[in-house]
Amino acid sequence: MNSSDIARLAGVSRSTVSRVINNYGDISEQTRQKVMAVIKENNYVPNAFGQGLAGKSTHIIGLFIIDRDNTSEDNLIISRSEVFATFVSYTTDIAHNLGYNILLSIIDSRHLGDIQRLFMNKSICAGLVIGDTFDQEILDSLAQMDCKIALHNQREHSDIPNIINVNVDNQHFGYLAAEQLLKHGHYKIGFVTGNFHKFTVQQRYLGFTKALSEKGVTHDQKLIGVGDFHRADGGYAATKQILERSAPDYPTALVISNSVMIPGVLQALKEIKLRIPEDISVVSIGGSASSSSSNPPITDLYIDNQRIASVMISKVTQLLDIGELNQYNFLLKEYDFVQRGSVRNIITTA
């Protein structure tokens, strides 16, 4: 027996059953008693809401930050990543305003099964997944368990009921960053990024190379630098790779695929006395505080993390409330290109 059966026997909608179980205040006492009588008569304990009959655990949403490749000595994941820290803050506030709490977990490759266990023991009613790419095998297993999950920048499309896919337009953002440099005469452009197993990295690089290809430029693989996508020291490591491979003929510009990496990029450039924008131009993607507070400030494509968090939580709570959605895939295209003078025009005129 499931909530649809209870709804049919009680003569109400499935969403009404959900609202009775979760003790919403907008249900009449008569309707509440009718639904609870059917539940009691049939000894019904809902899979997704069972714990809610005894307490408040069904109002806990798991926020899972997947971090497979952390090699930092201090092992500080959230506090060292402005993207993660900002997302956690927004998620907590937005969920609280909707009557939910957030259970935060940092998941590495050794503990991916922790997500399944939290769903199985009813500790959480839904999950949000950000960070590194989530295993398809585990996602399929969670889908079979009827778990409600919202993914961010994990895969291009979701065909699985109850799995919500929320992406930003990463490919277009990579294209715009390259286009900004190309129109100022830059063709030898470095790409500072994270590991290519990340969906975000793949998509931003696809857009980047598409813009170059339209200008007849093939991107030199030596100009790709890979580091930790969510940390400043990743920007340093990736930029060092590019500079060491290309010396002494350095690229005239860099695209930083995640603006959190900016401080590390600036450090690497400073060590060999490359000035921005006199010696090398820079454009970043992401919109972290590093873009405006760095010296010099960096031209940046700003992405709204608050909007992302809001869509993920609103859709997953709607799914919890009514049991289904009209659509499960959402592509957020909003951005703001902030010009800050880190790009020099090198086009020569006859």
Image (cartoon, rainbow, N blue to C red):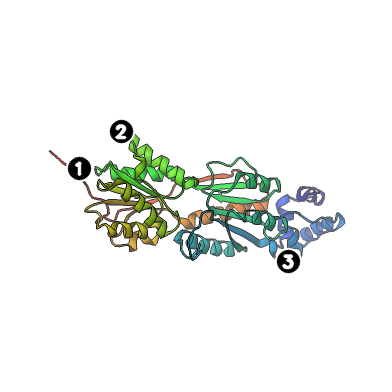
Q: Nearer the viewer, mark 1 or mark 3?
A: 1
Compare marks 1 and 3 and give the one earlier in the sequence.
3
CA gap between label 1 and label 2 equals 17 Å
**Side of 23 relative to 1 (left or right):** left
Q: 304 or 186: which is nearer to us? A: 186
User: Is residue 316 in view?
Assistant: yes
Q: The residue tagged with tag 1: helix, strand or loop?
A: loop
Q: The residue tagged with tag 3: helix, strand or loop?
A: loop
Q: Amino acid at mark 1?
A: Ile
- Quarter holding residue 259: bottom left
> Which residue appears at 43% of the width and 42% of the height?
171
Q: Residue 284 at what x, y percent from top left? A: 36, 52
The circle on residue 216 is: 2
> Which residue appears at 65% of the width and 51% of the height?
148
User: Is residue 169 in view?
Assistant: no
CA gap between label 3 and label 2 equals 62 Å
Q: 322 or 145: which is nearer to us? A: 145
Compare marks 1 and 2 and give the one earlier in the sequence.
2
- Quarter holding residue 347: top left
Mark 1 lies on residue = 347
- In this rendering, the answer to whether 111 lies above or below 183 is below
**Side of 21 relative to 149 (left or right):** right
Q: Are marks 1 and 3 in contact (CB under 8 Å)?
A: no
Q: Amino acid at mark 3?
A: Gly
Instruction: Bin the neighbour count of mark 2 within 10 Å (Cα to Cα): few under 14, some 14-19, many 20 and up.
Output: few
Q: Nearer the viewer, mark 3 or mark 2?
A: 2
Q: 51 or 3: which is nearer to us? A: 51
Q: The residue tagged with tag 2: helix, strand or loop?
A: loop
Mark 3 lies on residue = 55
Number of on-image labels: 3
Q: Are marks 3 and 2 in contact (CB under 8 Å)?
A: no
